[in-house]
Amino acid sequence: MIEQHMAEVATNANSQIQSSFPKAGVNVSYQDYQRGLFSSQVRIILKPDAAAAAAGTSALKTGDEISFIETIDHGPFPAAQLKKFNLIPSMASVHSELENTATLKALFDVTKGKSLVTADTRVSYNGDSSSAINFIPVDYDKNNSKLQFGGADINVAVDKELTKMKLDAKSDSIAITSQNQFGQQEKVTLNGFSLDSDTNQGASKVGIGDQNLTIKQVAVNVDGKDAASLDNFKLVSKFSEEGSNIKGQQDYTIDALKIQNSDFGSGKLTVKIDKLDAAALKAFSDSYNQQSQQLLSQAGDIDPAVYQQQATELLAANLPLLLKGNPSISIDPLSWKTAKVKVLSPFN
């Protein structure tokens, strides 16, 4: 039964990759399945599609291999779940971690031989699964650039068909230090990131549902001096499907914007969207994602200013797809408040 589920996982994963990232040029498979009485092991492998790799369009190069080592505790009461006092019968409990392959050697050097990400997944008998995913802290310094990542925890539950998903993610901090175009040391710090999401795939295979994003602070420091900060950024997003159309709204709030320690106030913004053609949205998303992936693969070979210009042109070129059906977009309200002034404006 577990072997059958592994085949289903690989099939579903490849189907999702083909649907969401058709130009990625990669395939998921499993190898070296070793079944034991109470537990088993298997390798889940991500490899480039041979034709895509030969054409240079795959996200991975020929010979590249990203693999996960999966340790499977058998049901109905997997040992890993019993250790957590979880007595709900399940088909299996799976512990996953990255394998140190030649493709990932540089990453494992950064993490000092540890897997950057591990996951513990409970697989129910109906094929639904829930996972607790952990990213370890990383401190990396090279060529005047530095990454300080405090780690992250993600909990995600998905149905068998991968059409419904609940997710919550949290990370305390991430800081990136690099030299800007003026030769100054610029440090961007993000503190208190959290995201929760409850989404499902609509009739047109477009994701709809509710999402909440919070960032406690984004701070920019240049040569040791505070340049700017954004406090308590929040985004609340709610979208639903009505027939062949998508409708919903996004609410943005900022508690404080400071530039060189001077208070520039707080703001709120609500964007409402109605009569957005679901098929047009999917066509826009598919086209834009495919082309942006191709552009991203060339990012290291072109000037940053040229890359930004091409990214802007790419978005503009695909916008007509999104505007099919004449959707309505309104901004109401847009407000900005300082100690002395309050601005309130509607836009349609």
Image (tube, rainbow, N blue to C red):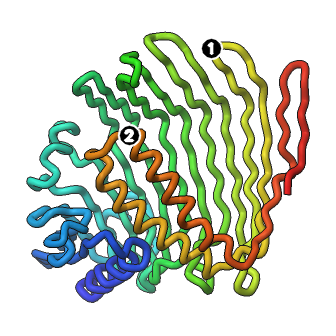
Compute the Cα span from label 2 to label 1: 26 Å
- The three-letter amino acid code for the residue at tag 1 is Gln
- Near-viewer residue (51 or 95): 51
- Asked whether residue 309 is in view, the answer is yes
Q: Quadrant of residue 207?
A: bottom right
The numbered mark, 2 or 1, whose residue comes first in the sequence reads: 1
For badge 2, the amino acid type reads: Pro
Vertical comparison of 217 with 67: above or below: above
**Residue 221 placed where, x, y %?**
50, 18
Q: Is residue 313 left or right of residue 331?
A: left
Q: Secondary structure at mark 2?
A: helix
Q: Nearer the viewer, mark 2 or mark 1?
A: 2
In the rendered image, the vertical position of residue 284 relative to residue 264, given as above or below? below
Residue 7 at x, y percent in the picture: 26, 85
Left or right: residue 119 versus residue 46 is right
Residue at 72% over, 63% down = 238
Closer-to-camera residue (268/290) = 290
What's the residue at 46%, 53% (across, down)?
Answer: 311
Residue 147 in percent (x, y) is at 34, 31
Tell me if 84 is positioned left or right of 200 in this view: left
Residue 181 occupies quadrant: top left
Q: Secondary structure at mark 1?
A: loop
Residue density around tag 1, few if under 14, some if 14–19, many if 20 or more, within 10 Å? few
Q: Is residue 41 visible?
A: no
Q: Quadrant of the N terminus?
A: bottom left
Q: Which residue is mark 1?
A: 260
Number of on-image labels: 2
Identify the mark at residue 304; answer none if there is no mark: 2
Residue at point 33% right, 72% down?
A: 23
Q: Quadrant location of the C terminus? A: bottom right
